[in-house]
Amino acid sequence: MQAGEPSNQNNQPFKDRKVLVVEDNPVNQIVAQENLESLGCAVDIADDGLLGLNAWSNETYDLVCMDCAMPNMDGLEATRQIRAQELNGGKNVHTPIVAITAHAHEENKIECMEAGMDDFLTKPISRAELQEKLSRWLS
């Protein structure tokens, strides 16, 4: 590294952090994955809430980005089931879950928080907003 160049830590402040993205839209999956990887995160993708719940059950994640509206099992139900497993001894750690939704109304945010999500982002998500949430939950 040359003098004056930013360190890799500054370029990828969340290196070695593992994030699960639960999102059914392929374009949104790619955007989320690229943004997270550019910040240093390792990323796994699940196409719906049931697959996300299964991935979370079988792996340790530092954070979950959870779409709310998906087929098979929506993000709200997946979050409820994750929280139930955490309470019943499935895992002895609270995994931060950030809701990702196109619905920006206050009642949507309340519904997400009541389901057990920790934070809320509306689509389209900017890299800066995502980085702020990661800083909040992974620091």
Image (cartoon, rainbow, N blue to C red):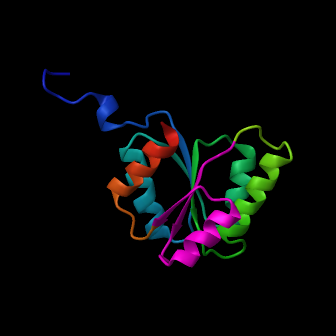
At 47% from the left edge and 45% from the top edge, which residue is drawn? 136
Q: Quadrant of residue 135?
A: top left
Quadrant for the N terminus in the image = top left
At 50% from the left edge and 78% from the top edge, which residue is drawn? 105
Q: Quick check: is 22 in the magenta stretch?
A: no
Q: Quick check: is 110 in the magenta stretch?
A: yes
Is residue 75 visible in the rendered structure shown here?
A: yes
40 relative to 104, above or below: above
The answer to whether 41 appears left or right of 98 in the picture is left
Q: Quadrant of residue 122?
A: bottom left
The answer to whether 99 appears left or right of 75 in the picture is left
23 relative to 9, above or below: below
At 56% from the left edge and 65% from the top edge, which residue is drawn? 23
Is residue 50 visible in the rendered structure shown here?
A: no
Q: In terms of depth relative to the viewer, which is nearer, 91 or 29?
A: 91
In percent of width and height, residue 56 lies at 69, 49
Residues in magenta? 94-121
In percent of width and height, residue 74 lies at 67, 72
Q: Quadrant of residue 28?
A: bottom left
At 60% from the left edge and 75% from the top edge, which residue is drawn? 69
53 relative to 38, above or below: below
The answer to whether 80 appears left or right of 29 in the picture is right
In percent of width and height, residue 46 lies at 61, 59
86 relative to 4, above or below: below
